[in-house]
Every structure is written in structure tokens, then in C-alpha cells.
């Protein structure tokens, strides 16, 4: 059932459903499994961080303590066009888990985040 409200529970549902799709995507999965791993034990800490991250983004909580840009800069270079695939899967999942207004709340923020990360990673590539 889609949620009209954004709650900690619906954030977990969104994050879990999204990363399940990422792990099935032939282009995204290799990047994520190389960085995180393939087992539930390896993924659990990442998912917990993503719950905290999206809780901060969507609800204004302050549990997330990290630097997404630094984390992404530590990855081996990858095709920045993959951000478009990431955004498409994220938007699809947001619409599957939330009513339109709540889904848009996530989607608008995901686009800003992706734009910032893409810009930072492009600068790394340009200066290399």
C-alpha cells in the first residue's frame, strides 16, 4: 500500500525496495557490490546509513553523520550518466511506495543530491 505520509517506516520501505532494484540492475549493481559487498551482513550497515540519510533529507532528523561527496569520491571512476539510471529507479520506487505528493518530495531532493554528486565527481575527472 502506498503511503501518503513520510515516516521512518516508509523511508525504510523506500530504501529497501530501491536497493533491491539497484542490486538487480546490470549497470548499477556492479558499482554497488564492488563498494559495499554482496551479503546481507555487508549491506546492513549501508542500509542503516541510508535510512538515517533519507530521514534527514525527508524529515529533517539529524541522525546521519557522514559526507556523501567524500564517500562517492572514494569510488573508482564510473560513467556519470549512471546517475540518470539511479534517479529513474529511485523515482519509480518513490512512486511505488508513496502517494504522488510524498513521492515528489523524495524525487526533488534526489535530483538535487544527484546533481551535486555528479558535479563533484565531474570536477574530479576534469582535474585528473
Image: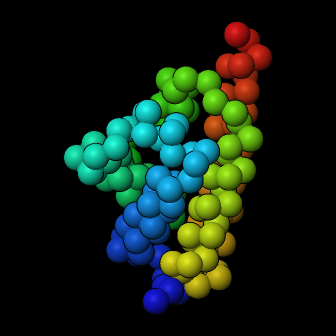
Q: Quadrant of residue 9?
A: bottom left
Which residue is rendered at x = 64% and y = 30% of the image?
A: 78
Vertical relation: 32 (above or below) 56? above
Extreme residue in the bottom direction:
1
Question: Where in the figure is residue 62, as x and y percent of width and height?
Answer: 38, 52
**Residue 128 visible in the displayed image:** yes
Question: Where in the figure is residue 12, as x and y percent of width and height?
Answer: 38, 67
Vertical relation: 44 (above or below) 104? above
Which residue is at the front of the view, 87 or 103? Answer: 87
Extreme residue in the left direction:
41
In the image: residue 108, left or right of residue 20: right
Q: Quadrant of residue 91?
A: bottom right
Quadrant showing the C terminus: top right
In the image: residue 15, left or right of residue 63: right
Question: Where in the figure is residue 54, as x and y percent of width and height?
Answer: 46, 58
Which residue is at the front of the view, 45 or 22? Answer: 22
Question: Where in the figure is residue 89, as x and y percent of width and height?
Answer: 61, 61
Which residue is rendered at x = 73% and y = 12% of the image?
A: 127
Vertical relation: 69 (above or below) 74? below
**Residue 60 visible in the displayed image:** no
In the image: residue 57, left or right of residue 7: right
The chosen color scheme is rainbow
Amino acid at each position: 500500500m502506498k503511503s501518503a505520509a513520510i515516516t521512518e517506516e516508509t523511508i525504510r520501505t523506500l530504501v529497501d525496495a530501491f536497493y533491491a532494484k539497484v542490486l538487480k540492475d546490470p549497470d548499477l549493481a556492479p558499482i554497488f557490490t564492488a563498494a559495499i559487498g554482496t551479503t546481507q551482513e555487508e549491506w546492513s550497515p549501508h542500509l542503516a546509513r541510508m535510512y538515517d540519510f533519507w530521514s534527514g533529507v525527508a524529515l529533517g532528523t539529524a541522525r546521519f553523520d557522514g559526507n556523501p561527496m567524500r564517500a562517492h569520491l572514494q569510488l573508482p571512476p564510473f560513467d556519470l550518466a549512471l546517475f540518470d539510471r539511479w534517479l529513474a529507479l529511485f523515482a519509480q520506487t518513490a512512486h511505488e511506495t508513496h502517494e504522488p505528493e510524498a513521492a515528489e518530495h523524495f524525487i526533488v531532493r534526489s535530483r538535487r543530491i544527484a546533481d551535486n554528486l555528479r558535479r563533484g565527481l565531474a570536477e574530479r575527472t576534469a582535474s585528473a
